[in-house]
Amino acid sequence: VQLQASGGGLVHPGGSLRLSCAHSGLIFDSYALGWFRQAPGKDTEFVGVHSWARNHITYGDAAKGRFTISADDAKNTVYLQMNSLKPEDTAVYYCAAENTVGPGSRYPLEYGYWGQGTQVTVSS
């Protein structure tokens, strides 16, 4: 399983970004793909997870109402659309894959495969 996150950058408060996670080697019904973020000096935070087996997406508290996860299976890519960005959204964003038939975990230790991360900076 290989994952590659991209799409980060510098954006003004209130702006939008779409992150992409290109994946290979996943068997869709056996994996969930999650998004996490880590700000300097803080713990890794759950953003959301897409479960192919359950056809379900779960969002973390910071993402609800502003972020949307979607999957384009033909392109082997999962997206994280982030709107109404705030300075506190500044972090390195990671995508990760969990081998599960469940809805996907909120806990990073459950994920065995990680992409390299992409920096998102929200600043005026």
Image (tube, helix red, strand yellow):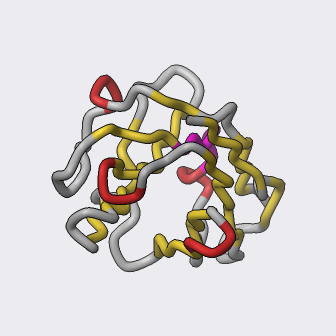
Q: Is residue 61 left or right of residue 79?
A: left
Q: Quarter of the image containing the N terminus?
A: top right
The residue lying at 71 percent from left, 69 percent from top is: 17
Horizontally, residue 96 falls left or right of residue 101, namely right
- In the rendered image, residue 113, in percent from the top left (x then y), is placed at 49, 30
Q: Nearer the viewer, residue 93 or 91?
A: 93
In the rendering, at what x and y percent does residue 15 appear? 71, 76
Residue visible at 28% across and 29% down in the picture: 110
Is residue 67 something that shows in the picture?
A: no
Q: Quadrant of the C terminus?
A: bottom right
Q: Position of residue 121 (x, y in %)?
A: 73, 49
The range drawn in magenta is 90-95
The residue lying at 56 percent from left, 72 percent from top is: 73
Left or right of residue 62: residue 5: right
Q: Is residue 18 visible?
A: yes
Q: Main secondary structure of the magenta part?
A: strand
- The furthest residue to the left: 102
Q: Quadrant of residue 55?
A: bottom left
Q: Is residue 7 left or right of residue 86?
A: right
Above or below, comparing residue 100 to residue 122 in the picture: above
Q: Nearer the viewer, residue 123 or 107?
A: 107
Query: Which residue is found at the position 20% from the left and 51% from the top?
Result: 101
